Amino acid sequence: MTRRVCDAGEVVRAQVVIIGAGPAGLLLSQLLHLAGIDTIVLERRSRTYVEARVRAGVLEPGTVELLKRAEVSQRMERDALTHDGFRIAFGSGSTRIDLRSLAGAPVTVYGQTEITQDLIAARLSLNGAIVFEAEEVVPLDFSGAKPRVTYRKDGRSHEIACDFIAGCDGSHGVSRACVPAEAISLYEHAVPFGWLGVLSDTPPVGHELIYSRGERGFALCSMRSPARSRTYVQVPVSDSPEQWPDQRFWDELRRRLPKDAAEALITGPSLEKSIAPLRSFVAEPMRFGGLFLAGDAAHIVPPTGAKGLNLAVSDAASLADALIAHYRHGERRPLDTYSESCLKRVWRAVRFSWWFTGLTHRFDEDAFTAKLQLAELEYIAASRAASTMVAENYIGRVK
Ligand code: APR
Ligand code: PHB
């Protein structure tokens, strides 16, 4: 049940209005609540829709710590898998990136879908205000001292007056779109392929993730549990899921995996199938007066490095800390440096995701690139220094 927020025509107040109930918006709301700061979250979609969305699932150690701090880690601590490493396969070669020995920590495998459910449950159990199916959300007057947000719900207009607005509304949201073009710089890099992802109740091919650079293109074997797999193959971005019946998907995946994994592959009906384009995108800065962007609203990375969710969570925590410093101690500096400090981390992740994508995907008709990929993969397999670079970036922390 959602708490009633305001009647039509009435102007209510909140310290922070958060647009978007993805991981960034929900975590921000929860961290601020724990610090005694009140928020209202406005979400365009229904709760059912938000809770069912299938997304990524590899958590850096820093993300796990933040979910613990937010007091939403109970189910994660019970159900998540801990992975000490992962494998990169390429043709006849293969190397294991030992995260624990090279970078000092493992990653945690736990779906973003579950994190979203845990956060929504926590917010609602604390009587947190989340307005689902909020339409025509508009952030207003954020360059002045009195920002406000208007929206419609069930055909009625509402207005919330606030101190700050957090734009956590993903890459197609309204927040970034409301910023005047001359105030924002956009950096973008696209590739002409996407990932076709399949969720299935089949056991994973191994205990750890396998990123595979096949002659026919990239493939990834990931998982959600010992009984549920999440697998991907690189496809042209113009393909649609309908062109990929289950049998075609499994046949293609098998062809792109190393022999042992192909032999271990157990197939089954898909529970979900979708195609995600691969692109890198950064908006700078991430703050415009009283409007702060966080997560996918400010940046997108290709999923190869598993960074999207981790960046969204880091942004939310940085913004929460800056707002807490402001409300508790009257400090302006953390708010002033929010954008700069996030963007350092963002560009590090953009670089890694772009590099890992370039290393493992098939670029059509480009035999020179293919040879360079193999040479670099051989080097990573042979060099502790090179695999340490991969491990440190993968866990998001330098040892
Ligand atoms: N008004 C209100 N809500 C909106 C609007 C709008 N105009 N536009 C979008 N939203 C909502 C979306 O429905 C979604 O629930 O904002 C939310 C944004 O959530 P995410 O897209 O999950 O973004 P974020 O919280 O930044 O998390 C990033 O999600 O896309 C993955 O790979 C990405 O793992 C990363 C994570
Ligand atoms: C996933 O489990 O969905 C997943 C894992 C690793 C990635 C991307 C996605 O790099």
Image (tube, rainbow, N blue to C red):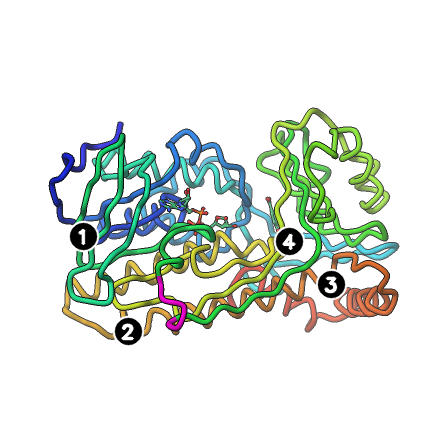
Residue 371 is one of the magenta-drawn residues = no
Instruction: Give the residue pinned by disc 2.
Output: 336
Helix, strand or loop for disc 1: loop
Which label sits in the foreground, 3 or 2? 2
Main SS of the magenta part reads helix
Amino acid on which disc 2 is placed: Asp
Amino acid on which disc 3 is placed: Leu
Q: What residue is shown at x 39% (from left), y 36% (from top)?
A: 45
Instruction: Give the residue pinned by disc 3.
Output: 359
Residue 153 horizontal side relative to residue 118, left or right: left
- Residue 85 in view, yes or no: yes
Q: Nearer the viewer, residue 143 or 107?
A: 143
Q: What residue is shown at x 46% (from left), y 50% (from top)?
A: 172
Which label sits in the foreground, 4 or 2? 2
Crowd rating for badge 1 (residues with CA inside 10 Å; few <14, some 14–19, many 20+):
some
Crowd rating for badge 4 (residues with CA inside 10 Å; few <14, some 14–19, many 20+):
many
Query: Residue 385: x, y in percent?
Result: 68, 73
Residue 367 horizontal side relative to residue 329, left or right: right
State how many labels appear: 4
- Estimate the spatial distance between the alpha carbons at disc 1 and disc 3, rounded to whole Å: 44 Å
Q: Which of marks 2 and 1 is nearer the N terminus?
A: 1
Instruction: Give the residue pinned by disc 4.
Output: 85
User: In the image, is residue 270 above or below residue 10?
Assistant: above
Quick one: quadrant of the N terminus?
Answer: top left
Q: Nearer the viewer, residue 116 or 292?
A: 292
Q: Which of marks 1 and 3 is nearer the N terminus?
A: 1
Instruction: Give the residue pinned by disc 1.
Output: 37
Q: What stretch is highlighted in magenta?
A: 179-183
Helix, strand or loop for disc 3: helix
Amino acid on which disc 1 is placed: Ile
